[in-house]
Amino acid sequence: MRRVNYLQNPTGDIVRLMIYKSDEGVYVFGFDDLADTSSKWDNLFDDLEEAFEFCQDTYNTDNANWINIEDPYTDCQHDWIERVRIKGKEEGRPQWDQFEQLINGRWTEIAKSEKVNSFGEMTGNERLFASGLLTEFKKSLTTDKPNAEKIVRALQCDEPSLKKILQ
């Protein structure tokens, strides 16, 4: 189980949180970037309740704003939304801070993008792409409309755009 939350009123430099329930416990990842990228920090909790409580107490999250996202693929980074892995790791020669993304069934090297501090000047599609939520949004449109709406709202689309995108 993984969920992401784009903070409505960020305090400090953290603008997005992710929760990931794994075999070891529940991770909370903190991000200082709206784009899909590596987290700035992570904390490990014993259970979901404790993780959600931390997010609510520390970052004033609203439990209704958490967006469901798929679990990471095997050998992929847990803190990225898209299917991303460290280049060379599967061969035992990891190239830290160099990443590959699974695109159309092929692992493709990706360049580190510029930090996204605001979605303000972006189109809806640009917001979905930059956030890493495009695949999740397309899937949610057919299987989970409320999750699709949460995604569009989290990316701060205006009401007319929201209605057009969700049609």
Image: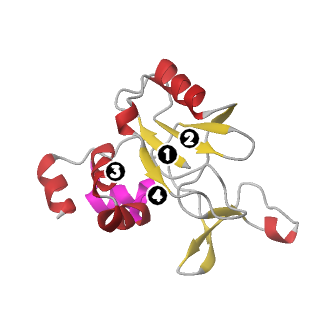
Quadrant location of the C terminus? bottom left
Q: Can you identify the residue that label 1 sits on?
A: 3
Residue 132, numbered circle: 4
Horizontal placement of 116 versus 119: left or right?
A: right
Residue 103, numbered circle: none
**Label 2 with label 1: CB-CB less than 8 Å:** yes
Tell me which label, 2 or 4, sits earlier in the chain. 2
- Residue at 62% x, 44% y is 21
* Residue 127: image location, x then y, percent: 34, 55
Q: CA distance from mark 3 to mark 1?
A: 11 Å
Q: Mark 1 or 4, which is nearer the eye?
A: 1
Residue segment shown in magenta: 121-134
**Label 2 with label 4: CB-CB less than 8 Å:** no
Amino acid at dot 3 = Ile
Q: Can you identify the residue that label 2 sits on?
A: 19
Q: CA distance from mark 1 to mark 4?
A: 13 Å
Tell me which label, 3 or 1, sits earlier in the chain. 1
Q: Residues within 10 Å of mark 2 (few under 14, many from 20)?
A: many
Tell me which label, 4 or 3, sits earlier in the chain. 4
Q: CA distance from mark 2 to mark 4?
A: 15 Å
* Residue 97: image location, x then y, percent: 71, 54
- Residue at 59% x, 26% y is 50
Residue 151, numbered circle: 3
Q: Give the structural element (helix, strand or loop) at label 1.
A: strand
Amino acid at dot 4 = Gly
